[in-house]
Amino acid sequence: MNAKKIQEIYKELFQETPKLFRAPARINLIGGHTDYNLGYALPMAINKHLFLAINPHDSGFDITAVNFEERVRFQLNNNAPDPLWAKYLHACLIALAQQGYPISGLRAVIGGTIPLGAGISSSAALTCGFLYAINDLFDLKLSLLEIAKLAQAAEHQLGVNCGIMDQYAILFSQKNKVLLLDCLNLSHTYFSTQLSDYQFILINSNVPHSLTESAYNDRVATCQSVLAYLKKQAPEVETLRDVSLSLLETHKTAFSELQYRRVRYVLLENERVLQAAKALEKGDNHLFGKTISQTHEGLRYEYEVSCKEIDFMIDFLKTIPSVLGARMIGGGFGGCILALVQADDIEIIYKKLATIYRKKFDYAPDLIRLHSDDGVRSL
Ligand code: GLA
């Protein structure tokens, strides 16, 4: 499915030429579950895309999702329409209306190449792409950051209390660059990577994850409960960024073992992001790989958001010298592994992995070769 195809389908349906937009998926090199704790993350957009063919229309919304072969028509003040993708779009329109931008109608065809449930933010590509297109078509003059916040608000409406990393990365990324994102100040710096003969790959476990699962919101709530307590104890604390390991240690007895363990993971993960960013910039692939593997250990044992299929693959990858590091990405409980691998060995490693994985779980993983890409664009 490519942009041209989406445009053709639109033309056939509506006999007019639409504007075209492209929104990428994202990966997060490191910084798992730090964003809603206002920490650091290191994401970048990748070469998997959602395409939108779209034009304003006088009365109501008429939207077709080609990948699902579904077409939905609704008015802004209707209840959210049924398929999940349409609920996301409706939530974007509600978020816009709440900010004083009621949109009365449009026609759109959407589709693309982002695998669903893979932890690479198909939903944020949808919301950010849609809002970006509306901003352009209706000349709303919203900044990229305002669009990111609206897209995040749409996710919140649907019950996922996510941070802003996905939306930010999908809107602000630049090809051949990685973003060091500071979720407290909502600012970023770009830098290039020097991987020499190594490459990042994704391996999709094909275990579908669902972020609406309460486990994600539970993690958010646990971190917030620790923060609320520490705020009362230490006046300098406003966010978890103000909490040092020693402060957490001092108040350890006030927390359950689980609260302590989760927040300790977040504090250490923020340190790892900064360390990994430096390693990447210097071209120290070995240190970078080691750091992302430590992140996975944290996600697996401390934050407890991994799953047996992902851990099985990570355990295998750990035994291979030309894999410098690997971790699960995204919200957790399925989706993709990101690995830093010697380029020449990618095929052979994937083949071995696919064989033992299929033997154990009876279904196959997918290899996704990736490169960094630009954020949302009009085409
Ligand atoms: C999901 C959420 C993000 C972030 C990641 C974990 O992708 O949407 O906000 O919390 O999980 O890092």
Image (spheres, rainbow, N blue to C red):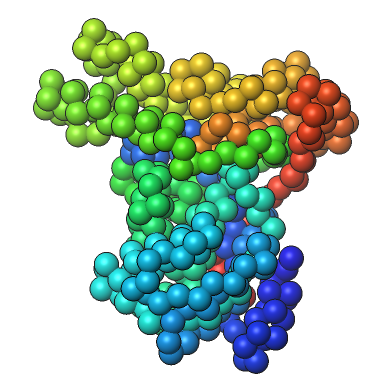
On the rendered structure, is 192 left or right of 345? left
Q: In the image, residue 48 lies at what x, y percent?
A: 67, 55
On the rendered structure, is 347 left or right of 301? right
Above or below: residue 197 compared with residue 19: above
Above or below: residue 357 compared with residue 53: above
- Identify the image quadrant of residue 13: bottom right
Residue 354 seen in render: yes
Above or below: residue 235 compared with residue 211: above
On the rendered structure, is 80 left or right of 290? left
Residue 198 seen in render: no
Q: In the image as oriented, which residue stretches furthest toward the bottom?
A: 15
Which residue is at 60% across, 34% downward?
334
Above or below: residue 258 compared with residue 60: above
Q: In the image, residue 189 lies at what x, y percent?
A: 45, 48
Which residue is at 30% across, 13% downward?
256
Which residue is at 34% across, 66% downward?
94
Q: In the image, residue 378 lies at what x, y percent?
A: 56, 74
160 or 4: nearer the viewer: 160
On the rendered structure, is 186 left or right of 251? right
Q: In the image, residue 368 lies at what x, y percent?
A: 74, 44
